[in-house]
Structures are given as structure tokens and as C-alpha cells.
Amino acid sequence: MPALETTSAGAGALIKIFGVPVLAGAAATALTFLFMWPRTRREAFVRFTCSICTSTILGPVLVVALHSWWPSLFESAAAVAAMNGADPTLGVLAVAGPIMVLAGLPAWWVLGGIVLWLERRRGKDIGELARDAAEIIKDVRGAQ
């Protein structure tokens, strides 16, 4: 039978690995509810799920990129946590958490924009949607 300390350490590691991205995605979704409220429960579920997935996938990538660009930020955060009697990992999570929340925000807004765009074109077939999209892209390129 494994020692209690080993089991609780493993559970704590799992929470840190999987819990932080999920909580970050949930926080990103909660923030965006303030600006872009979904029209249906289904839309809310899809946007919430995509926000969590984006935060889970893109969040760690952004944290690694930030760490390679600004490693002293993470060292300082760990030192501040240790000075306050907390685990230094908590300081790193204090930096990584907001980055992971920010990673989930674009998914919510992009999906909201796509839903709005498709809703305005309700009843059109795929060819008409493709022509509309091509026209928008042409307009954007012409504006540059």
C-alpha cells in the first residue's frame, strides 16, 4: 500500500497539472460572460467548452513562451511566495494562472463572432456562405 504522503502528493500534482488550465478556462469564460452573453444554453456550453480547451492547450504554450522570454518573472514570483511562507510553486502558478486565463479569451470571442456571422446569414447554403466570406476577405485586403 502506498504511503499517504505519496498519494496526496500525486493528487496535488494532478490538480496542478489539470486543475489550473480548467480553472483558468472557467475564469476566462466567466469574464467574457460580462461582454458577450450567449443566446442559448447550447451556445454557452459550446463556447465554455472551447474556452476551457483553448486555455488548456494554448495556456501552457504561452506560459512556456513567457518563461523563455522573461525567466526572472517566474523566479521572482517563486521567491515572493517562499518569503511569505508558501510553496514556491504557488508563486509560479500566480504568474501562470492569468496567462492561462488570457489564452482562453480568444476562443470565446471568436466563437461568438462566428455564431453572430452565421446567424446573420441564416438560410444560405455553403456556396453563398463561402462567397460572403470571400467578399469580406477581399474588403479587408482592399482596406490595407
Image (tube, rainbow, N blue to C red):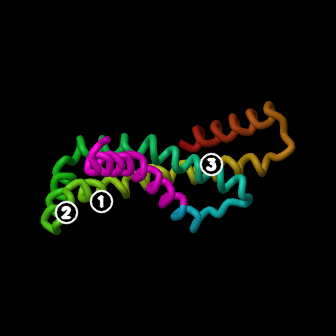
Of the 4 image quadrants, the one containing the N terminus is: top left
- Give me the residue at 16% from left, 52% from top: 75
Q: Residue at left 37%, top 46%?
A: 14
Query: From mark 1 to mark 2, how far is it between C-alphas?
Result: 9 Å
Report the side of 105 relative to 113 (left or right): left
Badge 3 is on which residue?
Answer: 111
Residue at image position (26%, 50%) is 5
Residue type at tag 1: Ala
Specify start and end residues of the magenta stretch as a single range: 1-29
- Residue 110, image x, y percentages: 59, 48
Q: Amino acid at mark 3?
A: Leu
Outermost residue toward the front in this view: 1
Q: Which percent across, then down, holds residue 8?
A: 32, 51
- Tell us which disc is closer to us: 3 or 2: 2
Residue 19 is inside the magenta segment: yes
Answer left or right for 86 relative to 61: left
Dot 2 amino acid type: Ala
